[in-house]
Image (cartoon, rainbow, N blue to C red):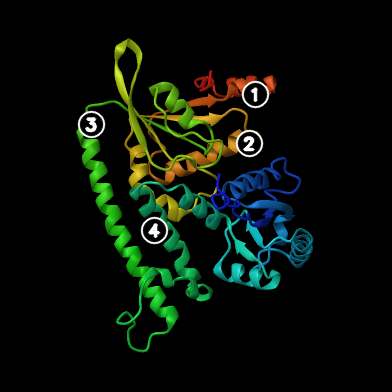
């Protein structure tokens, strides 16, 4: 290796996590930050500390209470952290006020998920959908961010009479949103044409919470080699393959993007081209991580998304995955009793 060929790894931002209790002394209060930590690490952050806000102490102006702001300030100083990640969504005013008081970059849950989706987007379709969601999220937050938008274009001939820079950028973003929506509509039409060509085939879609093992199960059933990674949202683009069912019959199996708690509405709307594959399937295989402590919460989060896209009433079979990794046999017996019609399996074995 030549002396000039080595490059140092990118510096990871040091982050503090902040969440709030689901309910006082609730057993799952710690799970929100466990998931937020995984999302933060997927986005490339280095987590240096955590704070938990009591549910009744949320402030309208800053979301976090004064005591928690002081706690974050102290912790960030000790850990040299420059990024605050929250497990809830903030209003533009809350984000601005919190950032000014802490002198830190503040990113809420939606902003973090959008960042991960942006990193994962590989195809033109995925990039269109992610950028559309990002711009719709960004539009109401432009007041403090317009100086970062020069990459969207502009210059001589783009500014109307009497417009401020903020108004110009709002107009640019709205114009870009309109263009992306038109491009996405073309994608939707193309996918519908493809589905019409497959209408005589029995269609099965995998759905589930992110990282439940959908892609691993997809590979096992179809002998495909879809990308698998032990991180959230490894799969953004739907992949369809033929697989064999009983008596030599064949069906189409589609792997789709994973769902998550508080999935941003902008993202659901932007990914409708992808999610229509789910809404029009003959059968949904709902893949559930059997090792997850909050199984019921994950199932409910998936059902919430299915309801929002009009797919909750589609025929559905639950598949509890990763049973080879379950260490609590009593818990597994409880799941079998609670879901007698479900399949219990390991996609790896």
Q: Measure the C-alpha gap from mark 1 to mark 3.
A: 39 Å
Q: Earlier in the sequence, mark 1 or mark 3?
A: 3
Q: Which residue is mark 2?
A: 294
Crowd tier of the residue under label 4, counting other residues whose Cα lies within 10 Å: few below 14, some 14–19, many 20 or above: many
Against 306, residue 318 (above or below) is above
Q: Earlier in the sequence, mark 2 or mark 4?
A: 4
Q: Residue at x 55, y 48 (%)?
A: 2
Residue furthest out toward the top: 247
Q: Are marks 2 and 4 in contact (CB under 8 Å)?
A: no
Q: Residue at x 60, y 71 (%)?
A: 96
Crowd tier of the residue under label 3, counting other residues whose Cα lies within 10 Å: few below 14, some 14–19, many 20 or above: few
Q: Measure the C-alpha gap from mark 2 to mark 4.
A: 32 Å
Between marks 4 and 3 in the image, the one whose residue lies nearer the viewer: 4
The numbered disc on residue 132 is 4
Q: Which residue is mark 1?
A: 326
Q: Secondary structure at mark 3?
A: loop
Name the one closer to the observer, 26 or 168.
168
The numbered disc on residue 199 is 3
Between marks 2 and 1 in the image, the one whose residue lies nearer the viewer: 1
Against 257, residue 163 (above or below) is below
Name the one closer to the observer, 155 or 191.
155
Q: Measure the C-alpha gap from mark 4 to mark 3.
A: 30 Å
């Amino acid at each position: 290796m030549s002396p000039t060929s080595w490059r140092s790894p990118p510096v990871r931002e040091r982050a503090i996590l902040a969440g709030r209790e689901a309910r006082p002394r609730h057993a799952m209060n710690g799970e929100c930050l466990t998931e937020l930590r995984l999302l933060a690490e997927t986005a490339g952050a280095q987590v240096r500390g955590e704070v938990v806000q009591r549910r009744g102490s949320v402030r309208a102006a800053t979301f976090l209470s004064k005591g928690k702001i002081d706690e974050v300030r102290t912790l960030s100083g000790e850990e040299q952290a420059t990024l605050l990640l929250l497990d809830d969504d903030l209003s533009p005013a809350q984000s601005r006020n919190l950032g000014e008081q802490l002198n830190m970059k503040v990113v809420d849950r939606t902003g973090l998920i959008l960042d991960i989706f942006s990193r994962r987007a590989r195809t033109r379709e995925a990039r269109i959908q992610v950028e559309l969601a990002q711009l719709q999220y960004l539009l109401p937050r432009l007041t403090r961010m317009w100086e970062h938008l020069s990459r969207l274009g502009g210059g001589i001939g783009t500014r109307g009479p009497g417009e401020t820079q903020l108004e110009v950028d709002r107009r640019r973003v709205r114009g870009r949103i309109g263009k992306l929506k038109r491009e996405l509509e073309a994608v939707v039409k193309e996918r519908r044409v493809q589905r019409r060509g497959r209408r005589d085939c029995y269609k099965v879609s995998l759905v589930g919470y992110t990282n439940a093992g959908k892609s691993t199960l997809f590979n096992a059933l179809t002998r495909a080699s879809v990308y698998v990674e032990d991180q959230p949202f490894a799969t953004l683009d739907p992949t369809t393959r033929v697989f064999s069912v009983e008596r030599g019959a064949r069906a189409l199996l589609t792997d789709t993007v994973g769902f998550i708690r508080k999935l941003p509405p902008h993202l659901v709307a932007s990914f409708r081209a992808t999610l229509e594959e789910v809404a029009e399937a003959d059968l949904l295989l709902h893949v559930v991580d059997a090792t997850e402590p909050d199984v019921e919460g994950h199932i409910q989060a998936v059902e919430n998304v299915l309801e929002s896209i009009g797919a909750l009433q589609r025929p559905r079979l639950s598949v509890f995955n990763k049973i080879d990794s379950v260490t609590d046999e009593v818990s597994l017996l409880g799941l079998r009793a609670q879901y007698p019609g479900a399949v219990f399996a390991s996609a790896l074995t």
